[in-house]
Amino acid sequence: MGLKLRGRRGYGAVLAEGMARVVQREGLGGSLVTWVPGQRQDVLDRGFDHAAVLARGVAARLGLPRRSLLVRTGFREDQAALGRSERFSNLEGAFRARPVSGAVVLVDDLVTTGATAGACARALLGAGATSVEVLAACRA
């Protein structure tokens, strides 16, 4: 909460360290790290993209390259106020991916229903990724 909602960038290092430890213990097939891009206004208000901070830390700790592959397409309602089915329909076509090859690790702070991760994964697979693994700091 401190990283995303209070703008405390330093919390990202602690979370990224924990995420990297899980990967080292459980394994990972991805060869490239990307992240779920934050909504434009949230990033401007906070001064940074919290998921990018996590991705930077995870990639550095795992020795993997990090690339910005995803772009949001237009405004979407905030997911927090939506129910499960509304979250999935809200994110249809919400992300566009740059061309990519190979297996991608998608980093985010939180997975609730999987709607955001699913929308991002579809965009990445459509752009050439062979697989997408989701790595999140926590799950609701």
Image (cartoon, grey):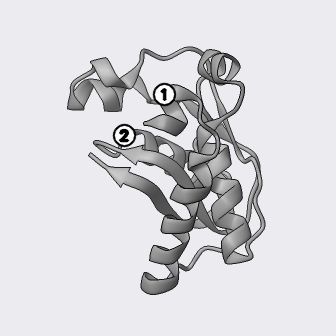
Q: How many numbered discs?
A: 2
Name the side, left or right, on which 60 lies relative to 45: right
**Of 47 and 78, the residue lying toward us:** 47
Label ID, residue 37: none
Residue 99 visible in the picture: yes
Name the residue: 47% across, 46% down.
109
Name the side, left or right, on which 109 lies relative to 95: left
Give neighbour class at mark 1: few <14, some 14-19, many 20+ (Cα, 10 Å).
few
Where residue 121 appears, as percent x and y from the top left, is 51, 51
Where residue 42 appears, as percent x and y from the top left, is 59, 20
Helix, strand or loop at label 1? It is helix
Image quadrant occupied by the C terminus: top left
Name the residue: 70% across, 32% down.
48
Which sits earlier in the primary sequence, circle 2 or circle 1?
Answer: 1
- Check disc 2 and give the amino acid type: Ala
Where residue 73 appears, as percent x and y from the top left, is 62, 24
Residue under numbered circle 2: 115
Looking at the rendered image, the disc whose residue lies closer to the viewer, 2 or 1, is 1
**Of 109 and 120, the residue lying toward us:** 109
Residue under numbered circle 1: 5
